[in-house]
Image (cartoon, rainbow, N blue to C red):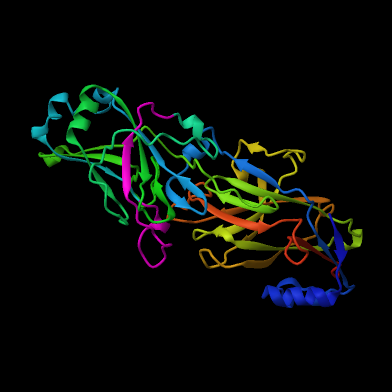
Amino acid sequence: MQIRALPLMFLAGICLMAAGCSEERYGLLNCPDGLDTFVVYPREEVQQITVIGDETGMAGMSSLYLGSAGGTRSDILLHYDFRSFREDYPNYPDSLFDPANIRSVQLTLNRMGTFRSGPDSVQTPGFIYEIRSLANGFDPRDYVTAPGPAVPLDGEILNPEHSELDDEDDPSFELREEDLIDWVTNRKSIAMVVTAAAGSDSGLVGFASRGTDPYGDPQAPFLLVDFRDRTLNLRINPTDDTSTFDQVAALPPDMAHLQTGLRSYPLLTFDIPALPAESSKYVIFGFRFFADSIDSFWVGSCLEVSQLDSGVPEDMNDPVLAANLEAASTSLFRICPGGLSGEDLDFFTTKEYMDWEPAPPSVMRLVFSFRGPFSRQGPTEETFFTQSTFFGPNGAPDLRPVLLVITCKRGE
């Protein structure tokens, strides 16, 4: 940890760069007794926090990811349980499931809002969707954190017509009627994997998972049985689903890495210098950091810097918090760059505290995260996979993150 006092001229330069550090907003230029300023560098260690949120972890995400980008790839796993079909669908006797009664059987996926076509969408890759059976199924408990285990892609192909590139928002895939009839009448438990086959575009796309309601209508990856009597059409939602994220890009070890969706957040610790008691009337914390665009991509989100609560142990090593991040931290800054990804980021933002009693903290632990809203319902950081890589404490002095501490005794 390094602390360096700053002259007022340097502070003024920071204020000009920040485009908003003004007399009207902060009152700095009216400080009657002068001000003390410090630049505080973080401790050398960058900790990574994995926030599970509940026992399902990654398998409980609101989105299902398919594709590959930047060394990270994921398939989609689906489980449909027909063993209790008679109880679940009492109005659909086995006699209905006959080739003479069925027009078609389809599996439908729904892209999440940011990945749908439109003026505000990100680049939406096309995939050659391949759906294969999984003879041994899968256990959602294996997909609490990433990377999850890869599944074999040697099962029977369930969508024979899968050779064309598809970039539709809600792709549907024809399945064989005889397969569904077998699953239903023999009360089977069926697992399948959806993968982006060779020839697909590069990119990771989020699709709605079971329980997601991004447009006012359930959007799970559902099976649709189209009967010749259309009043009987049947929709079957999966019992379990998950992204695999079986490969996660190896990122430079001397950087701070933020991966939402995977819910991996960097934690920086700053030791705050002792401040004179007469200065504690007015304290401003400013935070400046730089993001490396090479491995970074944002999905229409704002970056949030939160202070980890003092009750969370300080000596943790790669901790897994059993609670959502909001329950263990207090938001300090929210930064909305107005873009999706690609450019180097150099932000300066401030948080002021008036009449702090009894005094500012001696240690601040700051956690990076991303926030929405991403849809009308405003999903949290669990919804999308978003990654940003920041220069860490051991980087060059002009690139490493810094905390600016400004104190001023205001007139009574």
Residue lying at 44% horizontally and 55% vertically, measured from the top left = 203
Camera sees residue 90: no
Report if residue 2 lies within the magenta region: no
Assign the C terminus to one quadrant of the image.
bottom right
- Residue 28 on image: x %, y %: 79, 73
Residue lying at 47% horizontally and 42% vertically, measured from the top left = 61
Give the total number of marks visible in the rendering.
0
User: In the drawing, does residue 209 fall left or right of residue 102?
Assistant: right
Q: Which range is magenta? A: 111-138
What kind of secondary structure does the magenta stretch mostly adopt? loop
User: In the drawing, does residue 20 fall left or right of residue 218?
Assistant: right
- Residue 132 on image: x %, y %: 32, 37
Report if residue 132 lies within the magenta region: yes
Residue lying at 34% horizontally and 49% vertically, measured from the top left = 110
Foreground pick, 227 / 188: 188
Looking at this view, name the residue that lies furthest to the left: 100
Check the image and report above or below for 347 versus 367. below
- Residue 54 on image: x %, y %: 54, 35
Q: Quadrant of residue 42?
A: bottom right
Residue lying at 71% horizontally and 45% vertically, measured from the top left = 309
Camera sees residue 390: yes
